[in-house]
Amino acid sequence: LRASALREQFLRAKEVLWAHLYAGYWWGLLGFLAGIVWPLVVLLPRRAWKWRTIRAASSVFFPLTATPLKISGTEHIPAGAAVLVVNHSSYFDNVVLGAILSRPPIFAVKAELFRKFFARVFLERIGAIFVERMDVERGAAAAQKAARLLRAGELVVFFPEGTLTRMPGLLAFLTGPFLAAAEAGVPVIPVAIRGTRSILRGDQWFPRQGRVEVTIGAPIFPSGTDWSAAVTARDAARAEMLRLVGEPDLAEEVVTL
């Protein structure tokens, strides 16, 4: 019995040590790549070059951390304008999007990031839109700006939940992304990311090994350009997202992160 207990303790200690070594390597690699990507994105003159840099760094991160990445449905992303709505499970979702999108998108990001120097400079250089989630008037202005970019042929990425939570499930969707799609007359593409929450939870900074799956759904076309069409597109996109992610419906949850 004593030998068995010692063996279990040894195996547990080995497991804990490996987890900490992996976490240290994970963050070390991410920091190393970020140290290359940030100055290049700031200095490179062309947006396409900036995105190639981001995509290259994001893509190599997965094999170097032994994280399998499976992608399906890329044929649903059009060559022209579209709104991509993505479920938000983890801060790691941004690295996933960097790896899977072949052309430079416009990201709609929370306005709080504007107050953080390194994040603001980086995001401004890739053309991000800063969205005030708690201010209806400013949120509407951001939707108008997104609509103008969509009319110019851009691919605009939104996290319509507006935040993330450590618990599995899909939060309620904001209407702004769908107003922009309806006003510009472009499709909404639901993108479901699975696995990132297990790798890096929203309220923790200790990464774990796991696998990531991305499913890109069929386009949803708004039936008009008004509020009603936007709400209908929002509800259709959320229903499809729930089906793709296979997680609980957390529409009634109120989360602040």
Image: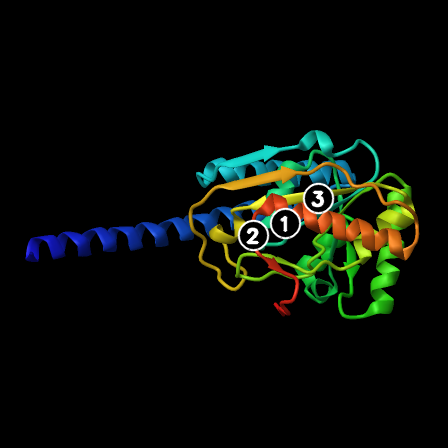
Whether residue 11 sits left or right of residue 92 in the image: it is left
Look at label 1 and name its amino acid: Leu
Provide the secondary structure element on which disc 3 rests.
strand
Q: Quadrant of the N terminus?
A: bottom left
Q: Residue 105, image x and y in percent?
A: 75, 42
Residues under numbered marks 1 and 2 in contact, where contact means CB atoms less than 8 Å apart: yes
- Rendered image quadrant of residue 77: top right
Mark 3, residues whose alpha carbon is within 10 Å: few (<14), some, or many (≥20)? many
Please say if 40 is above or below 142.
Answer: above
Q: Is residue 42 visible?
A: no
Measure how far apart labels 3 and 1 are at the Cα level. 10 Å
User: Which of the marked residues, 3 or 1, is nearer the chain's N terminus?
Assistant: 3
User: Residue tagged by mark 1?
Assistant: 242
* Residue under the point 44% across and 58% down: 206
Dot in front, 3 or 2: 2
User: Residue tagged by mark 2?
Assistant: 247
Q: Quadrant of the C terminus?
A: bottom right
* Residue under the point 77% across and 52% down: 234
Q: Camera-side residue: 128 or 168?
A: 168
Measure how far apart labels 3 and 2 are at the Cα level. 15 Å
